[in-house]
Amino acid sequence: MQETVAQDGGNAGGGIARETVLRALWNGRVVRPRREVPDMWALCEQLRADGLVLPYPGRGDGAICLSRKGRDEVVKLFGATMVELPEPEEDGPNLPDLSHLGDEARLAAHGKWLRERFPGYWSAKDELTRPESTVNSARGDEPVFIMRARDVVAPQTIGWWIWFARGLGVDEPKTARAEIQRQAATAWVEKALPATREATRRGGFTARAAKGSAESVLQRAHEDEPVFVLRASDLLGSWTVLVWARLAALNGAPAEKIESAMEIARAMQDWSVKRLPGAGPTDQFPDENG
């Protein structure tokens, strides 16, 4: 994430535009007002008084982030809009008709079809049991964000991760594997808006909790269900969680779930080690490491 410290002339009426700060916060930037920039300091103090921003101690003294009320205000100001990536046309047969089966049998049969249709995709069981999986490769205390295919906004969010990755030059095999996950998630038969769980409210979003908590996404997902795991050391991770939060909000997900995702995004921002997917540690983006 980039850090914003406004120091220019601001709007036509003098000072810094309130909307500029709110938009910067919504776009995932960290704002740290300075006393030596009086207009900025006064504006952020007013935003605090209005309940639109909250302190963000993990990014230093004076840092702020949007409150839930602030996010609602941004949607009122700029509209609930987001450019969508075009979805590539899917080749091959349509989803099989499994309506005659009960829930468990239907998901098992669908998982078998999905394995044939998208060989090599990663399922919840793969993430839990394979030592090279993303969650098993993370440190136990590393924040992670797990999207399951049941989540209606997961495929598009994965598409944004791929777009970000290609823009930063991530190697094609890595993005191709992500594209398989996106397509497999799109084809998963069960769909719903993500719901809030007590485990995430309590901050149970580490790799250790993802593997060990009965309430974690991985533990609740069907063993054949495609999943996509973002870890804090992924340079694209926190940006992608913010995209997910925006899409989920636009689709009517519970406010508590959006708040939980924002909390995870902030924890991921604060994680000290960052890597481009498929590469070693990088000091190319000091804001991410500071």
Image: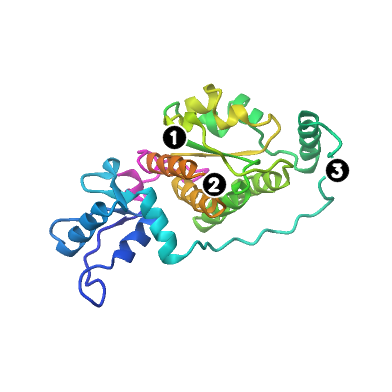
**Which residue lies at the image location 18% right of the left edge and 58% below the top edge?**
41
Residue that lies at the very extreme toward the bottom in this rendered image: 12
Residue marked by disc 1: 143
- The answer to whether any part of residue 27 appears in the image is no
Q: Nearer the viewer, mark 1 or mark 3?
A: 3
Residue marked by disc 3: 97
Q: How many residues crowd mark 1 within 10 Å: few (<14), some (14–19), many (20+)? A: many
The Cα–Cα distance between marks 2 and 1, rounded to whole angstroms, is 22 Å
Up/down of 40 relative to 12, above or below: above
Secondary structure beneath label 3: loop
- The answer to whether any part of residue 195 appears in the image is yes
**Is tag 3's residue or tag 2's residue first in the polypeptide sequence?**
3
Mark number, residue 3: none
**Is tag 1's residue or tag 3's residue first in the polypeptide sequence?**
3
Q: Which residues are magenta?
A: 268-290
Answer whether residue 250 is magenta in the image.
no
The Cα–Cα distance between marks 1 and 3, rounded to whole angstroms, is 38 Å
Provide residue 215's location: percent of width, then percent of height.
Answer: 55, 26
Residue marked by disc 2: 253
Provide residue 110's location: percent of width, then percent of height.
Answer: 79, 37
**Is tag 2's residue or tag 1's residue first in the polypeptide sequence?**
1
Q: Amino acid at mark 2?
A: Ala
Q: Are marks 2 and 1 in contact (CB under 8 Å)?
A: no
Secondary structure beneath label 2: loop
